[in-house]
Image (cartoon, rainbow, N blue to C red):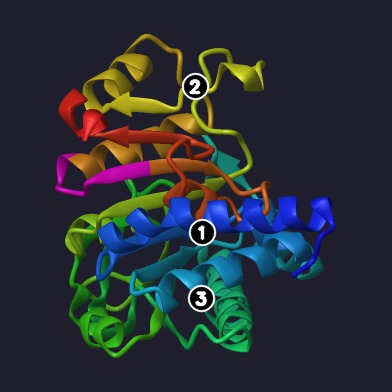
């Protein structure tokens, strides 16, 4: 046994972390966690590797993670290469037919398989799907249809995912889905993740973002709100405290909770192993939204 106090201290810290994780591993064994993967965690190699290992570990200790992803930066890169100007309105991509071709090529053909390959490499045993596969997600035009083939979720049928989860696989789902006549639509990945979590009655919905979570002052990272009830989250939106890109993410969490998801988390994906820190530690690192004050106290 080493007598080096530094080594002993480090070993004690590691064991302490594992010990703290044990009740969460036991509590969430067999439960489903829908993870929306995006932002810096998708483009930074170190963060990407950490996410893959976190997901593989969650699966190895008996949880059932499901990954939903977008891929905005790579879509923009390919649009630029093909001399197609990326266009956005109110933060949403205007998706004409040529843009839709690129979206489908990038999300289904490239990004999805990169994630699958990364998870398989670390022992995660992943399977890639799009929302179109087995009509997992049924799309409809977004709003009045003025943004072209931008879509929203009309219905979710997770039957194709159930046997994959029971067999120990990690489903990886791109946010492209077809409508009733088979026309592909581009759907916001946060929205797909939230609706899928509701359909699966997931224990948790986790959105990896490039912010610490919901802030009382969006210019001050130290103003992070660590826990919120559903009613409080709605009030923050009504008061204008939640603004910009955080609004649709918060609304996504609210909708998922209203449909039976136990907890929703907005987590800073720029922190290595953010998933494990949020799921396996008492304090967590982001904002957790739950249905009621009673749920916070449990």
Going 16% across and 28% down the picture, which residue do you hit?
A: 294
Q: Position of residue 277 (x, y in %)?
A: 53, 49
Magenta-drawn stretch contains 125: no
- For label 2, the residue is 243
Q: Position of residue 37 (x, y in %)?
A: 53, 59
Going 63% across and 42% down the picture, which residue do you hit?
A: 210
Give the foreground label among 1 and 2.
1
Q: Position of residue 136 (x, y in %)?
A: 26, 75
Q: Is residue 188 visible?
A: no
Q: Is residue 159 visible?
A: yes
- For label 1, the residue is 18
Q: Residues within 10 Å of mark 1 (few under 14, many from 20)?
A: some
Towards the viewer: 2 or 18: 2
State the image quarter where residue 117 is shown: bottom right
Report the side of 271 relative to 32 (left or right): right
Disc number placed over residue 139 in the picture, else none:
none
- For label 3, the residue is 56
| Nearer-N-terminus badge (3/2) | 3
Q: Secondary structure at mark 3?
A: helix
State the image quarter where residue 247 is shown: top left
Q: CA distance from mark 1 to mark 2?
A: 37 Å
Q: Secondary structure at mark 2?
A: loop
Q: CA distance from mark 1 to mark 3?
A: 16 Å
The magenta segment: 258-264
Q: Please say if 124 is above or below 27.
A: below
């Amino acid at each position: 046994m080493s007598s080096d106090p530094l080594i002993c201290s480090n070993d004690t810290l590691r064991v302490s972390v594992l010990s703290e994780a044990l009740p969460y591993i036991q509590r969430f064994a067999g439960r489903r966690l829908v993870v929306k993967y995006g932002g810096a965690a998708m483009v930074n190699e170190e963060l990407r590797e950490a996410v893959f290992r976190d997901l593989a570990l969650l699966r190895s200790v008996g949880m059932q993670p499901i990954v939903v992803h977008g891929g905005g930066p790579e879509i923009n890169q390919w649009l630029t290469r093909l001399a197609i100007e990326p266009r956005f309105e109110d933060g949403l991509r205007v998706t004409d037919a040529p843009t839709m071709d690129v979206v489908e090529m990038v999300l289904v053909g490239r990004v999805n398989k990169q994630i699958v390959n990364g998870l398989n490499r670390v022992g995660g045993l992943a399977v890639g799907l799009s929302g179109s596969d087995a009509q997992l997600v049924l799309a409809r035009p977004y709003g009045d249809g003025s943004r072209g083939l931008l879509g929203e979720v009309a219905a979710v049928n997770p039957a194709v995912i159930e046997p994959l989860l029971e067999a120990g696989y990690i489903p990886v789902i791109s946010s492209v889905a077809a409508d009733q006549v088979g026309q592909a639509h581009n759907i916001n990945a946060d929205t797909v993740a939230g609706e899928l979590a509701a359909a699966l009655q997931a224990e948790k919905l986790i959105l990896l973002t490039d912010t610490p979570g919901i802030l009382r002052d969006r210019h001050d990272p130290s103003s992070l709100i660590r826990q919120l009830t559903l009613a409080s989250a709605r009030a923050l939106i009504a008061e204008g405290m939640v603004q910009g890109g955080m609004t649709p993410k918060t609304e996504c969490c609210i909708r998922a909770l209203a449909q039976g998801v136990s907890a929703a988390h907005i987590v800073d994906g720029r922190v290595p192993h953010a998933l494990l820190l949020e799921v396996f530690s008492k304090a967590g690192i982001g904002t957790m939204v739950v249905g009621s004050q009673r749920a916070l106290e449990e």
